[in-house]
Amino acid sequence: MTVAEFGSFAELVLTRSDERGDADAFVFLSEGARGTQAEHLPYAELDRAARDVASWLQERRLQGRQVLLLYPSGPEFVKAFIGCLYAGAVAVPAPLPSEQGQHFRRVSGIVRDARVGAVLTLAEHAPEVEAWLAAEDFGDVVCLPTDAGPVGDVAAWRDPQLGPEHLAFLQYTSGSTNAPKGVMVSHGNLLANEAAIARATHNTPDTVIGGWLPFYHDMGLIGHVLQPLWLGTRSVLMSPASFLRKPARWLQMISEYGVNGSGGPNFAYDLCVRRVTDAQLEGVDLSSWRTACNGAEPVRAETLKDFAERFGPYGFRPEALFPCYGMAETTLLVTGARKGRPALLREADAAGLERGALTGPYLGEPRRTLVSSGVADGEDFEVRVVDPDSRIEQPGGLVGEIWVRGASVASGYWERPEVNAEVFGARILGQEELGAWLRTGDLGVLEGAELFVTGRLKEMVLINGRNIYPYDVESAVRSLDPALGAGAVFGVDAEDQEHLVVIHEVRAAAAGSDLRTLTTSVQRLIGQEFSVPAGNVLLVRPGTVRRTTSGKIQRTLMRRLFLGGGVTALHSVLDPGVRDLVESTVDTARAADAAPAPAPVG
């Protein structure tokens, strides 16, 4: 199976539907009053439903236009997404606000940014969506519920004659460091990355895929919805809410359906270790699970070890763990662990990493365990580590920004020409004639062919001339006491110097304990382990630390909330200069809000 066989992903799905007919493409699991219920979507039925939606879009001349998809994770999303591809429209997956407990503010921004021509959703959500469109003055955007019966004329559908260069969808980034932007993923990008995923994971048409990630997220969409269509196999899917309520359901699903490939962010594996009980694992057999993708940046060595030990007695094999690296800008996967061996760990000198070199570890010195995110297949990607300031390629063993290129790299962000020139058009000094690279914004180091991701470039904290990785501090604090949960570490400028700020959640059961002593322990640990002052520590309730949809800590957002007075602490200590900075920022914001609007000119 090669990319060259198909001109577009729509052509691939048409071919798979002819080949597979009434065989299941998807099995959707839902939790009801009578337990778990399975809804089957065969290839032939998916094809008919997609042609139905596509004919409706084509009738309204939406070929080449953006179409917003607002669905929970389920069969109607898949039908609508493939329907957009069949029509030659550009799908724009987005979170359903009511499902996320949010309002429509974020999707309003997407509608404006993408210049959406239509919104597809479920009948039960259509009245709310239509009211939102009217309130936001999107009068020219039509809303269509796709689950109330045929919406078009299947016989009227016509092949849009797409090529690899045509846009397939806009993947709006989750915004771990910046405002979300729409990544332009072409049919060629999508075909190339699905082929890369299959090569890296050794997936075949006999591989059963399964998962729970939201469909608007790149790993959920590319890995769990579109990879099985590329393979011509089936995927077993459940909702994110079902997993979060009861993580054991993920493992039970893998066991019952013989799932071979499934994955999630680092926190998903941690959640299983903490919350899945022996009673819930009765009869569970995880021996079918051959590829357990972990796409966090960076992947935690402790997580891999704890998961393998906890579920080894139930058939899970350590070599199934598949640390990998990727992002929406590369469609999804860039590098993956070598199959058939346990994850590669590298002990490093922590101080050396701060200075930008992979050295050590040295006896008696603080160390950090790095997990390799694997290697890039030369057929799919080139990976370089580059000094972000000088743009000089770094030799192996030195830390720099990860730059990549390959057929899976998107052409850029939707209508962001200046950003695209900087991010997608970067050139290595002295190698300009070799062409452009994608600047990922991630820091990493190459040792041989193995890529170790060390952090985010924009989240690095510089204190007393030292580069402090927020992840390292968060990890150290979290290991201090079982009462401590997720954390966000960042820097703020006050009194002409950078100050470290540590925000950490305290598990609900420990919220009433001696938080003053716990805060002092956190400060002492950071001082001993990192030799930097920790004058700003806030212990907060669970759920305070914001994450992206993929589970990444939103440190930039947490910094903004902190400075704006938007973080409520159960207990805190703050340096006087930092306290003054926060109060000044809040006062300035209040004054701006209270200022009268300027008088009209003329």
Image: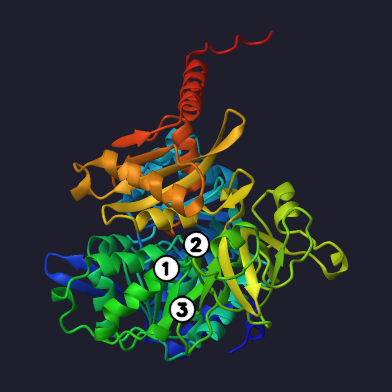
On screen, residue 36 versus residue 162, left or right, reads left
Query: Is residue 82 in view from this perspective?
Result: no
Q: SS for tag 1?
A: helix
| Label pair 3/2, CB-CB below 8 angstroms | no
Image quarter where the N terminus lies is: bottom right
Secondary structure state at the residue bearing disc 3: strand
Q: Out of 442 and 30, give the one closest to the viewer.
A: 442
Q: Are marks 1 and 2 in contact (CB under 8 Å)?
A: no
Q: Quadrant of residue 380?
A: bottom right
Give the residue type at disc 3. Answer: Phe
Of 416 and 57, which appears nearest the observer? 416
Q: Is residue 130 left or right of residue 404?
A: left
At label 2, the amino acid type is Pro
The residue to which callout 3 is attached is 322
Query: In which quarter of the view is residue 356 placed?
Result: bottom right
Picture coordinates of residue 91 (x, y %)?
A: 53, 60
The residue furthest front is 364
Residue that numbered label 2 is attached to: 366
Q: Nearer the viewer, mark 3 or mark 2?
A: 2
CA–CA distance between discs 3 and 2? Answer: 27 Å
Assess disc 3: are there few (<14), some (14-19) or many (≥20) residues with their C-alpha within 10 Å of its C-alpha.
many
Marking on residue 78: 1
